[in-house]
Image (tube, rainbow, N blue to C red):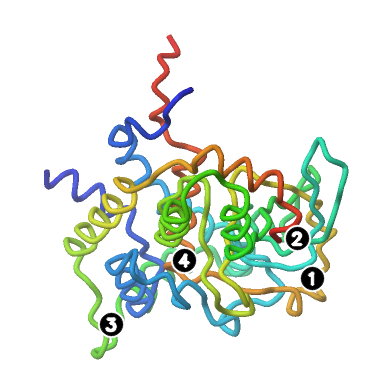
Amino acid sequence: MSDVFEDFKKYLPRYLSSLSSKELFDGLKDFPENMNKRFYTDEISLDENIIYQGDGIRDLPFIVFPSTKTGNLKAVILTNTCDNDINNKRLNTSYICYSPLILLDSYKESLLKNSQQSKESVRGHIDSIKRQEATQFFYFPRGGNLENDSIIDFSLICSCTNKSIARESLRQKRLFSLSNYGFYLLLFKMSIHFCRMGENIDRR
Amino acid sequence: MIDLLTTSSSYSPLVFILPYSLTLTTVTCIPNIHSINSNMDSSLIPLVQRYSWEDNYTPSAIVDYTDEEKLTILKDFATKLISNMNDVPSEFAEILSENFWELI
């Protein structure tokens, strides 16, 4: 057991200061009763020219095939930070993946209007989303420049070329950047959504 | 239909560790860090890494959790999250898909 623990310690986030580490683990300890502004960080401490994984950014182009309708939406960056950095030299064109922010209240109203399920069932579903229990959704509480509670659906993803997002206007377009706690939770749920192994299929 | 959550316990160790791996990768490949290192005398790099002030300095007012406490917190967090996860009901997912442009 002690060997397992020694191995585990390698994965602890050593790059964090004591204060940041304490805040991260405070956040994880209080989960899920703390879906609030602790999700977001003060942008002053980050480089305003870098697009960070988990950032909320407005005016990103979006399309959902087979419909050809397009629009510019608020979305959350899913590509990791170093892949977003335009200063990284690459042999290939780089793209940024993002998922649009969906208004939670509008989603709830749409369910109440269109679903055959009871109101209690819909409300239970919304409460479950707010506790981050829905596998394919990630809940973003109101905070930063995000005015309304929102969600993203990990299965609704679009991409654009990295260079097409103007860095000069990034400061105005950025809605929020995640805190260490919000970022950890995002990676955790992304890992479960995209990388879980329990598919119940023997691929022999 | 395949129920992807029925064997959740079988993947919990992986997801337990994976986010940290990803986080470490993300941070260490930010180009600013590379550029700092590339401009330095390479013989200094081990010294700088070994004596990073963040590794050796703990403000007296901030007492971080011990590694054992962190392990317990992470285990409890992962258990709480994974054991309560559920798929979005298909009817709800369909409504979201059909009304997507009105919900943004």
Do residues under tags 3 and 1 come within 8 Å of each other at their CB atoms? no
Chain of the residue under label 2: A
Q: How busy is the neighbourhood of tag 3: few (under 14 within 10 Å), some, or many (20 plus)?
A: some
Q: Marks 3 and 4, Cα distance to the nearest angstrom?
A: 24 Å
Q: Marks 4 and 2, Cα distance to the nearest angstrom?
A: 24 Å
Q: Nearer the viewer, mark 2 or mark 1?
A: 1
Q: Marks 3 and 1, Cα distance to the nearest angstrom?
A: 36 Å
Q: Which image quarter holds the N terminus of chain A?
A: top left
- Residue A20 visible to an observer of this rendering: yes
Do residues under tags 2 and 1 come within 8 Å of each other at their CB atoms? yes
Q: Is residue A153 above or below residue A56?
A: above
Residue at image mark 2:
A86
Residue at image mark 1:
A167
Residue at image mark 4:
A182
Residue A11 coordinates in the image, percent (x, y): 34, 53
Report the amino acid beneath label 2. Answer: Ile
Same chain check for tags 3 and 1: no
Name which quarter of the figure residue A175 lies in: bottom right
Report the amino acid beneath label 1. Answer: Arg
Q: Nearer the viewer, residue A109 or B62?
A: A109
Q: Nearer the viewer, mark 3 or mark 1?
A: 1
Residue at (28% x, 53% y) in the render: B80
Chain of the residue under label 3: B
Asked which secondary structure carries label 4, the reply is helix
Asked which secondary structure carries label 1, the reply is loop
Residue at image mark 3:
B58
Q: Nearer the viewer, residue A107 or B44?
A: A107
Q: Nearer the viewer, residue A15 or A116?
A: A116
Q: Marks 2 and 1, Cα distance to the nearest angstrom?
A: 9 Å
Report the amino acid beneath label 3. Answer: Thr
